[in-house]
Image (cartoon, rainbow, N blue to C red):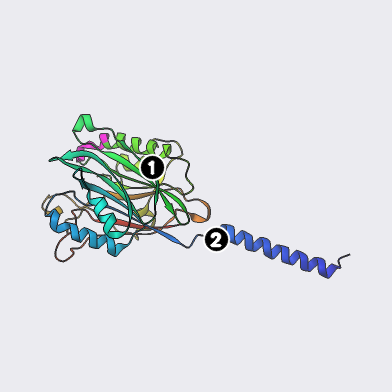
Amino acid sequence: MTTAPERRLELRVRTMTEQREHRENNDAIETRLRVLSWNIWWRYGPWERRRPAIAATLARLDADVIALQEVWGDGTTNLAAELAAELGYHHVFAASMEREGIGFGNALLSRWPIARSDSIMLHGEKETGEGRLALFAEVDGPRGRVPAFCTHLNWKFEHSHIRQRQAADLARFVDRMRPWSFPPIVCGDFNADPGSDEIRMLTGLAACPVEGLVFHDAWNCAGGGGPGHTWENANPYVEAKFEPDRRIDYILTGWPMARGAGQVVACRVTGNEPVDGVWPSDHHAVLAELRY
């Protein structure tokens, strides 16, 4: 028969154990996943001189998952494969069209193995002659699999109606890749400003293409204010186009899960300076850190 003091001690121990378990189940995850998105400008400009600048920038930033747009492929190799080999990453690549007989597409690079991958063509090729796609890779990371997507939408200012169809295709593709145990990460050059209909429909500010599927804009969540321009006249390749500064490159993340999994805790624009006197691309890159 237990005494009253023994019962009080037992109750105290049980309460402390329950409190500890509650904290362990609800404390925010402290480890991070670093995600980079970057349009690397195909073979435009001084592409052979730009290549080492791209590689050096990627090595310096040391992201866990890298989404690249305007990746070239010549049928034998592609830039993503070369960069992955140099950096010690896994990769998938898909070409959406050809320019001058050379493939033009998207790639996903990962520090960890890629368990599965897929891609779809997006709306608009017949109307505009631009082939655009969405690429998926399920990254088999050390703390669970991560669903990552990379896309690149039509570029012309007047093609918002095309991009809206493409954004809807993208959302349905993301939804088809369920189930996932970590929020989906969608990266890319959307060629659209934050207030555009195509971005609003993905971030829940307009009618969503897939009910219940909305994304956070990493820059809005943790960019620290400022315009976050990724197409900027400070870059000489952009200055030559006589266009306004814009934020058109994004990392979008699904709703956070238990203990904040997938929450964006930091975001910055990078790849925005020359390397050994050479600008790596006409676009700046976006780098985000997520709880993982």
Q: Main SS type for the magenta part?
A: helix
Residue 226, given in percent of the width and then of the height, sits at 30, 59
Residue at 45% across / 50% down in the picture? 145
Residue at 20% across / 47% down in the picture? 72
Please identify the residue farthest to the right as the structure is shown: 1
Specify whether residue 232 is in view: yes
Please identify the residue farthest to the front as the structure is shown: 76
Q: Secondary structure at mark 1?
A: loop
Left or right: residue 21 compared with residue 182: right
Q: Which residue is mark 2?
A: 27
Q: Which mark is residue 42?
A: none
Q: Secondary structure at mark 2?
A: loop
Tell me the kind of residue under disc 1. Answer: Leu
Q: Tags 1 and 2 in contact by the CB under 8 Å rule? A: no
Magenta residues, as a range? 156-162
From the viewer's side, name the closer residue of 152 and 246. 152
Q: Which residue is mark 1?
A: 205
Q: How many marks?
A: 2
